[in-house]
Amino acid sequence: MDLAEELVAELEIPTAFTIPIGNGIAINQTVVITWCIIAVLFVLYLILTHGFVTQNPGKRQAAVESFVVWIQNLIGSNLNEKGKPYLPYLCSILVFLGVSNIVGIFNVPPPTKDLRTTVALAVMSIVLVQAAAIREKKVGGWLKGFAEPLKVMLPMNILELFIKPLSLCMRLFGNIFAAFVIMELVKMVVPVVLPAALCLYFDLFDGLLQAYVFVFLTSLYINEAVE
């Protein structure tokens, strides 16, 4: 199989299993991996937060609280005061995306390599942005904002509702899939040492970076919506 055929094959997400209801409900590999990531994170949260106390915390609690404060400061620095209520959502998305992007290290296909995953995440974020705008400005103020700063901008502002999620999902999907393409090219040229080193870069560093970029852009959109 040449590189082009392999790339096409990678775009086809296989079915993991079929639920025997009616004609059968196919559950693809991306959904199963996403469920597994959510389950692992949920169990990990339960284990790490078990037995927390308000006084004289142990080393585990201190480490967890330090991580939470660090990630809140990392994301919170991008939000204005009106955007702070959305910090828990953004931190949750950052952790989920970070884990989803780096599972490739364990030879697990990243869910974000499936365009449907990135589309769903982008739509969720943009719906949240619009909900934040309506909450802050009410429905009338939100609708009025489409005609600002000039009424002639109305078509462009409406179009922006579709451009923002498209930009978010394609940026995330494009970077994750581009990393796969580069790795396949490298494996064809230098099949031994270099791929292992680049795997750490693309699956770890670049994966975490793309998760942060996604959340960073979402936070900017929230700031713009609630101003």
Image (cartoon, rainbow, N blue to C red):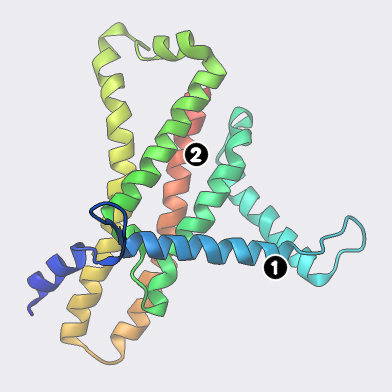
Quarter where residue 199 is shown = bottom left
Asked if residue 77 can be seen in this view, the reply is no
Q: To which residue does mark 1 refer?
A: 47
Badge 2, how many Cα within 10 Å: few under 14, some, many 20+?
many
Q: Name the quadrant of the N terminus.
A: bottom left
Q: To which residue does mark 2 refer?
A: 219
Q: Is residue 138 above or below residue 224?
A: above
Mark nearest the camera among 2 and 1 is: 1
Q: Is residue 166 above or below residue 134?
A: below
Give amino acid for label 2. Ser
Tell whether 158 sits left or right of 60. left
Tell whether 129 sits left or right of 115. right
* Tag 1 secondary structure: helix
Tell whether 181 sits left or right of 103. left
> Measuring 42% from the left and 32% from the top, which residue is drawn there?
127
Q: Position of residue 52 (x, y in %)?
A: 82, 61
Of residue 74 and residue 117, the one placed in the foreground of this image is 117
Q: Earlier in the sequence, mark 2 or mark 1?
A: 1
Quarter where residue 165 is shown = top left
Give amino acid for label 1. Ile
> Measuring 27% from the left and 92% from the top, which residue is drawn there?
192
Looking at the image, the residue that sits furthest to the front is 22
Q: Is residue 185 above or below residue 216?
A: below
Tell whether 67 sits left or right of 23. right
Q: Position of residue 74 (x, y in %)?
A: 59, 51
Asked if residue 187 can be seen in this view, the reply is yes
Q: Position of residue 123 (x, y in %)?
A: 37, 38
